[in-house]
Amino acid sequence: MTDPKMIKPELTEYHWALYACGHLLDLTSEAHPPVGLYRDEESANLHGLRMWPTTFTVVDLHKDDRS
């Protein structure tokens, strides 16, 4: 990173992933990566509620075994 004020994130600290779940509204049939990664579940849920009140999912990347 070129800006010394921006530190490179430690990805192992981010346990929660937010998915928008457009497939619930038949907007897509393809798999999509998470919209964001979070250190805590509350932040992920709050962001999901503000952006997609009924169609988001928060996944614990260290416990959920999605395949």
Image (cartoon, rainbow, N blue to C red):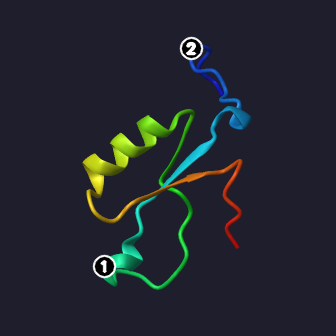
Local secondary structure at mark 2: loop
Q: Which disc is residue 25 wearing?
A: 1
Q: What amino acid is labelled 1 in the image?
A: Leu
Quick check: 9 above or below 45?
above
Where is residue 26? Give x, y as percent: 34, 84
Mark in front: 2 vs 1: 1
Where is residue 8? Give x, y as percent: 67, 27
* Residue 57 horizontal side relative to residue 27, left or right: right
Q: What amino acid is labelled 2 in the image?
A: Lys
Write the residue at 34% across / 41% down. 46
Q: In which quarter of the view is residue 57 placed?
A: bottom left
Residues 54 and 51: in front is 54
Local secondary structure at mark 1: helix
- C-alpha gap between disc 2 and disc 1: 40 Å
Quick check: 35 above or below 23?
above
Name, please, the residue furthest toward the top.
5
Q: Which disc is residue 5 wearing?
A: 2
In the rendered picture of this protein, how many numbered marks are placed on residues? 2
* Residue 52 horizontal side relative to residue 9, left or right: left
Quick check: 58 above or below 4?
below
Task: Bin the neighbour count of mark 1 within 10 Å (Cα to Cα): few under 14, some 14-19, many 20 and up.
Answer: few
Comes first in the chain, label 2 or label 1: 2
